[in-house]
Image (tube, rainbow, N blue to C red):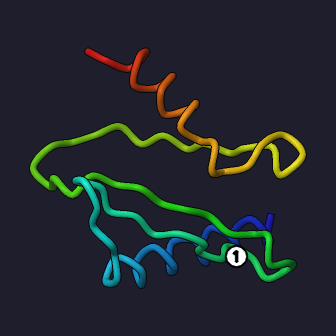
Amino acid sequence: MKTQAVVLSLIFFAVVVLLQASTKAQGIRKWTNIPYATLSDAQKLDIYTSDNDDVKFPVIVYIHGGPSFNSKENINTVFGFLDKHLKK
């Protein structure tokens, strides 16, 4: 339980800090390879947000199964599914 609190605190801190250094491309703000723990170099996350601050969007948390299941570079499959099924 204590470990989860530390991890969540680190994630929150990383997001707040990295909001200052976002990169914009095609209407998307992107922060990559943000460490959420210090047990290994593999414990990193990416955050993608819209650069349109006037519109509210749902939050989607996608956790892939690691390198044995697929790489994060193939996440377009997930985004395609979400785009198809989350349309209003």
- Residue drawn at 79 percent across, 70 percent down: 42
Q: Check the picture and name the quadrant holding the C terminus.
A: top left
Q: Secondary structure at mark 1?
A: helix
On screen, residue 86 above or below 53: above
Q: Label 1 crowding class (10 Å Cα cut-off): few <14, some 14-19, many 20+?
A: few
User: Where residue 68 sits in the image (x, y, percent)?
Assistant: 90, 45
Q: How many marks?
A: 1
Q: Quarter of the image for the N terminus: give it.
A: bottom right
Residue at the spot x=53%, y=69% of the render? 32
Q: Which amino acid, by three-letter code, is at mark 1? A: Val
Image: 35 above or below 1:
below
Q: Nearer the viewer, residue 85 or 58?
A: 85
**Drawn side of residue 85 relative to residue 46, left or right:** left
Answer left or right for 16 relative to 39.
left
Residue for point 51% across, 72% down: 12
Residue 62: x percent and y percent? 60, 42
In the rendered view, would you say 36 is above or below 60? below
Residue that appears at 48% across and 60% down:
47
Left or right for 6, reference 47: right
Pick the front one: 76 or 60: 76
Residue 66: x and y, percent? 82, 50
Q: Residue furthest right?
A: 68
Q: Disc 1 designates what residue? A: 6
Residue 81 lies, in percent from the top left, at 51, 22
Task: Judge from the rendering whether residue 79 lies leftward or rightward of residue 74; answer left or right.
Answer: left
On the image, which quarter does residue 22 sit in? bottom left
